[in-house]
Image: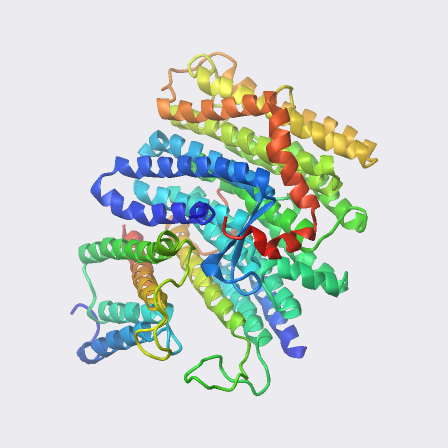
Amino acid sequence: MRGMSLIVKTITNITVGFMFIYGLYIILHGHLTPGGGFAGGVIVAGAFVLKILAFGSERSAEKKSATRASIFESIGGLLFIGIAMSALLVAGTFFLNFLPKGTPFHLLSAGIIPFCNIAISIKVGAGLFSIFLALGAMKYIMED
Amino acid sequence: MIIFASCIILFLIGLYAIVTKRNLIKIAIGFAFIEYAVNLLFALIGFKHGALAPIITQVNTPHNFVDPIPQALVLTAIVIALGTTALMLTVILRIYNRYKTFDIAEIKKLKG
Amino acid sequence: MSFIPLFFALPLITAFLIPILGKIFKPLIWIVSTLVSFVLFIISLYGIAVTQEIPMVVYKMGNWPPPLGIVMAFDSFSAVTVFVISIISFTSCLFSYRFLSRYTGQWKFYTLLMLVIAGMMGISITGDLFNMFVFLEIAAIASYALVAFGIDAKELEAAFKYMVMGEIGGLTFLLSIALLYAKTSTLNLADISYSLQVVGHTPFFWMILGMMLFAFSIKAGLVPFHSWVPDAYPAAPAPISSLLAGICTKVFGIYTMARIIFNVFGLTRAHDPMFFNILIGMGLLSIAFAGLTALNQTDYKRLLAFSSISQVGYILIGFGIGNFYGIVGAIFYILAHGFAKGLLFLTSGSVVYATSTSDLKKLAGLGERMPTTAWSFRFGGLSLVGIPPLVGFFAKLFIILGAIKAGFLWLAVLAILLSILTLAYLLKIENSVFMKKRKSDTKRAPFTMRIGMVFLVVLIVIIGIGFQPVMDFIVGPAAHALLRGVEYANLVFSHVLVNF
């Protein structure tokens, strides 16, 4: 049987969704509560890692996810610099918080910071997941 | 003062592991020690007795916070440490794949 | 719109764009990265033009004023460094096109290369200590990965050594930042400078400075801590050796050291002669030890690696002399050695490309088959030795002039004598690689490789012949920027020059 035992698989199936949602919560409330893009991205990546650990995976599927993860990582990085550069282009200063700040302690506030958090979370989540895949792929290299 | 000194001691323990241990994985652990020591030192520098965590949750909070900057720095340093550790472990595994050993004394194809 | 953020934003954007571009059309990767490094070159020329009129351009990231937010402080010394970085990275990119044809996963190479460039650009323009550390680590981690790019046994071993040494240096730097923050409660270089003037030269001050000197000596590959250099340079692909030897060690180690010694800690030769004598001592040790070791080497790239360690010693001597001429010499040397050693490593790359070996005993008679490579080697070598009218001559001349002005006649004589070592080990390469009878037929260096080498040769000759304008407009102001000392802080805080 591929992956771990039935108990682990069942528990994983139940918890993975919650982990994912919790990660999203941490990301989206990054400007209001402790946490933010990095912590949330790690939790989201943790959900993916748990899924792969519990259910196992094929080498070809891992390769495909590694490619996808690297593309997502680039997109995250580009988004983050894109936000900073758009501040430069629109408002004339790199990393200026040029969007309206809104009322404090509301979800839609703090200007560009929530968007930065989202970009960071994509970058960190994909990056951490691809680190996991790269270290996991070492077992194939060892076998060759 | 003692608490700062203990951070430095932790740093030196890590350095000791890097310099004297022959196992590659133990060297990587030595680096983890050093990173923890520096991060701990940063967190302690910002600490104040009886102060709150620097999180503003309402409009009128008392301004008695610990210094938030070292915490931000620690976060950045942790990210960098993550990158270094991941790269180092990958290189170590690749080395193991080529040399079939973790012993640094047997890894010497280079002259120096 | 300001040009300052472009220095690190452009290479970062390219670095993240490359994995996506690579999926669409492969040659686009090379075109885009070469183009971007050329654009950086243009921007750096503009930067030099700007610093002619304004002593320092202060850029507030996100419009936060200096002690609160991160500032970018771009002065003449930054302008010189950025200029050299952009040139060496441009030629490395040009050279990589054909050289990399035997490797797989080329997009990874260019992504990492762009990260190294972004990190170096960031180090040389930042005005914030922790920001400097972050950029240093970005560039350093990318360069560890680049050294291991061949993933063969030797490459991995070299990369591991480099990583262990480099990380000890980096983490010591972080520890010294922590201690400095505990004392001064600020990370802005200018603000730290103010605070340290109040603190005075206490044992704590010297301890922090010693830790930073240790960290930067590792990063610069100076002699007691040089063991990673002769492994890492030969193991890396030639364009990366060119980048590492040409500019990385100087930005990671020498630039940061000079900036912190002169502008942040505000040391001057008049007040602390002991410290500057230590710098001179370390420089002499590097020159002599690495120069003598280079004589026994039998590998092309390994010999050049020892030569780099030895040449970095001259830069340190220049800063150690500490008067105007010494510092001008040191900055000239950063230029001269960057171009010359970058060029020499590129010639080693084209030899490796043609013959697949860098062993001096197996190579012979390449001079007639590869004239461009051979003549590039000769020009680079002569510049390194210090033959007029090439740029290396003026670098040595100013260092010697500075030594005489400071009253170190023995140092001037020693510097001249030690440059004979340089001539000796370079003649060894010339003799065994380019002279003698040809053993077998080899490939020729492709067009893009030759363009990169010729570009550097032209620069070496032009800057050498036209040294007077270079001295007046580029190097002289940079030396003044360093000698300005703690005035640096006043300039950062004078809000007149903000957001150019």
Q: Nearer the viewer, residue B86 or C161?
A: B86
Image spot of residue C317 (x, y percent): 71, 39
Q: Quadrant of residue C309?
A: top right
Q: Nearer the viewer, residue B76 or C422?
A: B76
- Please indicate whether residue B92 sits to the left or right of residue C128 in the image: left
Q: Quadrant of residue B82?
A: bottom left
- Give the colour scheme shown: rainbow
Q: Quadrant of residue A93?
A: bottom left
Q: Work out whether residue B112 can be spotted.
A: no
Q: Count the marks: how many?
A: 0
Q: Nearer the viewer, residue A86 or C297?
A: A86
Q: Residue at x 17, y 78 (%)?
A: A6
Image spot of residue A102 (x, y percent): 34, 73
Image spot of residue C89 (x, y percent): 45, 37
Outermost left residue: A1
On screen, residue A66 above or below C430: below
Image spot of residue C494 (x, y percent): 61, 55
Q: Residue at x 50, y 17 (%)?
A: C375
On screen, residue C445 above or below A124: above
Q: Nearer the viewer, residue C265 or A128?
A: C265
Outermost front residue: C496
Q: Residue at x 60, y 20 (%)?
A: C465
Q: Work out whether residue C45 can be spotted.
A: yes
On screen, residue A18 above or below C232: below
- Please indicate whether residue C338 sits to the left or right of residue A116 in the image: right
On screen, residue C51 above or below C130: above
- Please indicate whether residue C41 sits to the left or right of residue C187 in the image: left
